Amino acid sequence: MRYTLWGCVAVVSHSKSRTVWKMVRVPKELHDRISTLADREGVAKWKIVSRALTFLESWRRAGNVKKLPRFDKACWYIYKLASSVGIFKEVPSDDNYQKLLKTISQIEERLGIDCSLLKKAVEDYKRRPTVSNKIELNDVTKLVIGDIIAFIFLVQAQ
C-alpha cells in the first residue's frame, strides 16, 4: 500500500513491521490545497491524498464517464415531461396539448418507454379538466418518470 505526502508530499509504504516514508515533489498550489483540506478535516495530509486516489480509482473502475450522457439524457426527459404536464394542467390549450404530445412521442421513440397510459390520461384531461382526471394524469406521469429512472438503471447494468 503506497500513499503520498510529507513536506512536499510523502509516500507511505506499509510493510509488515513498519511504515516507510518517501518524498514526492508537488507544486506549491497543490500542497496548499492538500494542507487546507487536511486542516479542515483534522486528518493527516497523506490521508487526503489517499482518499483522493481511492475515489479516482473507484470512479474510473465504475466507468462513470461513459454513463453520464445517458443519465443526463434521462434527467432531461424527466424534467421536460414534468414541465410539459404542469403547463398543460395549468392551461390545457391546443398549443400546450401538442407540445405535451410531442414530448411524449420523443420519450417513446428515444427511450423506448411505453406511454400509452399517459396519452390516454392526457386525452381524458383535455376532454374534461376535472380534479379526478388531474389526479389520474399526475399518477400516470409519475409512472412514466419511474420508467425513465428504471431505464437509467437498465442501461447502467448493461
Image: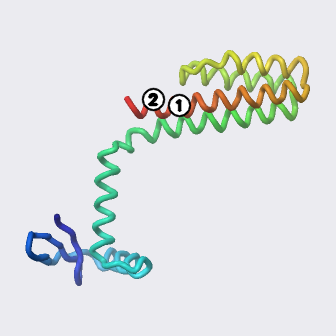
Say whether residue 114 is left or right of residue 128: left
Residue farthest to the front, as pictured = 17
Residue 153 percent location from the top left of the image: 47, 34
Q: Classify 29 as above or below 93.
A: below
Residue 62 percent location from the top left of the image: 34, 44
- Quarter that holds the C terminus: top left
Q: Classify 16 as above or below 135.
A: below
Q: In which quarter of the image is residue 68?
A: top left
Which circle marks residue 154 in the picture?
Answer: 2
Q: How crowded is mark 2: few (under 14 residues within 10 Å), some or many (20 or more)?
A: few
Residue farthest to the bottom, as pictured = 7
Residue 113 percent location from the top left of the image: 58, 21
- Quarter that holds the N terminus: bottom left
Frontmost residue, 48 versus 139? 139
Label 1 sits on residue: 150
CB-based contact (under 8 Å), mark 2 and mark 1: yes
The residue under the point 28% across, 61% down is 53
Frontmost residue, 81 versus 18? 18
